[in-house]
Amino acid sequence: MKRTAKGFARRWTGRLALSCLLLLMLLPWAAQALPPPERLEWHGRTYAVLGDPLAQRYAGRDRPRFMPAPLHTATDEERGYSGRWRLEDDRLYLVDIDSWLCIDAAVYAGECHRVTLPELFGVAPGKPVFADWYSGELVLPPDALSSRARERTIRITLKAGKVTRIETVDEAQPAARDH
């Protein structure tokens, strides 16, 4: 009986070590599989955003071939970029974008460069872009890592980049504020 238990322990220890090694090898790939969320700065906090305000900017027109990394074409599930947004004075601004563009038929990373807001929108460096093209809803889910008690989902409705409604959704009762 002792031999069987020791053999079992050795086999499972080896299998566990192999599983951990495979997991560590796949972890970077898994992290790249999901695009980073859009981020929104509001009232001194940074929120993950469910939504893609920049997509409306390119609806019906040519969209740059955004890439999450040089020579890495975005899949259908990826946007190819991650935007950093700010709500200020009830207006939505694009503050920064993290993406790459490559020369058509690029074969090496040297033919690629990071995208800038001046390049995309013709604004001065460091100047945010008012998102007047965006009408829709941004959803700010609760932060799972927050230490704040009873975090709630926030829904922000915008029309032409201006806030029209902010709704805090709680399981007990929803509260809303119209602008």
Image (cartoon, rainbow, N blue to C red):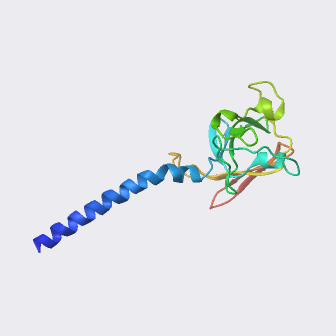
Indicate the position of residue 52 as horizontal and vertical percent values. 74, 49
Q: Which residue reaches farthest bottom?
A: 1
Let me know if residue 146 appears in the view: yes
Q: Is residue 7 above or below residue 120?
A: below
Residue at point 12%, 70% (across, down): 3
Image quarter of residue 102: top right
Q: Quadrant of the C terminus?
A: top right
Q: Pick the quarter of the image with the N terminus.
A: bottom left
- Estimate the x, y position of residue 62 in percent, counting from the top left: 85, 47
Residue in the picture at 74% in, 25% down: 126
Residue 134 appears in the picture as rendered: no
Foreground residue among 157 and 63: 63
User: In this picture, is 145 found above or below 84?
Assistant: below
In the rendering, at what x and y percent does residue 99 appear? 68, 39
Q: Is residue 146 left or right of residue 139?
A: left
Taking depth in this image into account, of 158 and 26 the one nearest to the observer is: 26
Which percent across, then down, holds residue 152?
A: 62, 53
Q: Is residue 41 above or below residue 140?
A: above
Residue at 44% over, 51% down: 25
| 146 on left or right of 95 | left
Of 19 and 176, which appears nearest the observer? 19
